[in-house]
Image (cartoon, rainbow, N blue to C red):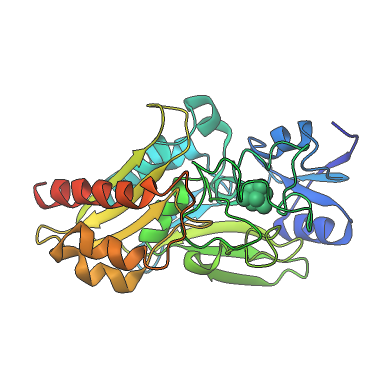
Amino acid sequence: MRSFTYERARTPADAAASVARTSGAKFLAGGTNILDLMKLEIETPTHLVDVQDLKLDRIEATGEGGLRIGAFVSNTRLAADERVRRDYGVLTRAIVAGASGQLRNKATTAGNLLQRTRCPYFYDTNQPCNKRKPGSGCAAIGGYARQLAVIGGSDQCIATYPGDMAVAMRVLDATIETVDAAGQTRTIPIADFHRLPGSTPTIDHALAPGELITAVTLPRPIGGTHIYQKVRDRASYAFALVSVAAVIRTDGSGRVAFGGVAPKPWRIEAAEAAMPRGAKAVADAVFAGAKPTSDNGFKVKLAMRTLAAVIAEGKNA
Ligand code: SF4
């Protein structure tokens, strides 16, 4: 690990300003991803701005009947919150499907959204990787790509977004609140937060340099049966090959987003009208244009079969 300087921020705007004015600075919250990346010298920040004392750790009811989740609420607290378990069950189920108990105790809401891909070549600094080193190439294209994206990738990068929580937030239409170095706030719909790689795979999300996440807001509850089904190579502590976050009504209609298949939580709202006709009709629309590799073509069928099980469970609940 390389040396770096460290400060504890006193306000969200101060934190944003410090990161914006210091070349190579990064925020530090739970540290469950960035510290690993620093040890491997994949992330090499010159300065860390610790945001854990900013008191952004409350879960509050909103005037619109939803919930506002502070950026640094731990994954454990969020999953266990009585209101989340009752009204947003897909979120609780997604969070507890990820990582381990110890990691969820430290990981934060904002950090979970910002976690970086687990593409094996991203972590191997002997391999070319456009996301880690722009213009170096992509070892995954033509390499071992079992875990990687079947849709939404580019000729520069086919990495997947690895998280579970954000897939559930996508199906719940969450919005992300931020503050920038000038103290200006803005709200980003989660659909627009994570970005596809295109020709700039180093950029994972819509935040400007120094822009700090302060909260995530959930709209009022939508009812239905909430299900998160994660399919992976081992039963725990593994990233999704395919995951399905869904809210299902008894007639089979509802909402669905997929994880493990694309560089961002993958939801095609127009395809949801097909849910009463069954999983194949939905999957045909969601995965139209998919470009799997020889290693991961199974994901399209796996996603369809997982959705079929989820719809059946939701209709029978
Ligand atoms: Fe890097 Fe993306 Fe290629 Fe993986 S898929 S090696 S993260 S450029």
Q: Is residue 136 left or right of residue 30?
A: right
| Picture mark count | 0
| Residue at point 51%, 58% (across, down) | 264
The x, y position of residue 14, in whole percent, is: 79, 57
* Quadrant of the frame with the N terminus: top right
- Camera-side residue: 64 or 84? 84
The x, y position of residue 110, in whole percent, is: 58, 50
- Camera-side residue: 145 or 260? 145
Residue 61 in sight: no
Residue 4 in sight: yes
Q: Is residue 97 left or right of residue 142?
A: left
| Residue at point 74%, 41% (across, down) | 127
Residue 274 lies, with reference to residue 133, above or below; the image says below
Q: Is residue 87 left or right of residue 60?
A: left
- Camera-side residue: 36 or 199? 199
- Camera-side residue: 245 or 187? 245
The x, y position of residue 142, in whole percent, is: 60, 48
The answer to which quarter of the image holds residue 231 is: top left
The answer to which quarter of the image holds residue 275 is: bottom left
| Residue at point 49%, 64% (across, down) | 190
Residue 290 lies, with reference to residue 309, above or below; the image says below
| Residue at point 59%, 41% (across, down) | 118
The x, y position of residue 79, in whole percent, is: 40, 40
